[in-house]
Amino acid sequence: MKVAQKNVRVFHIEIDDEAVFLDYFR
């Protein structure tokens, strides 16, 4: 989970898209 959270952080900054971020986090 820790690694996933780190990836999500970078992913969110890279894509900078709420829709994709929500879908990925979901």
Image (cartoon, helix red, strand yellow):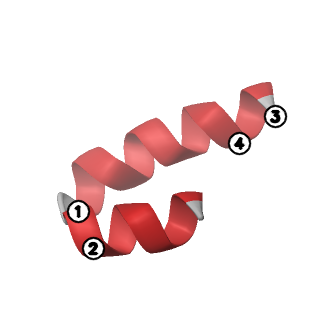
Describe residue 14's horizontal placement relative to residue 11 as left or right. Answer: left
- Point 23% across, 62% down: residue: 18
| Amino acid type assigned to the residue bearing label 1 in the image | Glu
- Identify the mark nearer the N-term, 2 or 3: 3
Marks 1/2 in contact by CB < 8 Å: the verdict is: yes
Marks 4/3 in contact by CB < 8 Å: the verdict is: yes
Q: What x and y, as percent, mark residue 17?
A: 20, 66
- Identify the mark nearer the N-term, 2 or 4: 4
Residue under label 3, please give it: 1
Tag 3: Cα neighbours inside 10 Å, few (<14), some, or many (≥20)?
few
| Viewer-side label of 4, 1 | 1
- Point 27% across, 73% down: residue: 19
Query: How many angstroms separate mark 2 from mark 3 (CA)?
Result: 21 Å
- Identify the mark nearer the N-term, 4 or 1: 4
**Label 3: element kind:** loop
How many numbered tags mark residues here?
4
Residue under label 2, please give it: 19
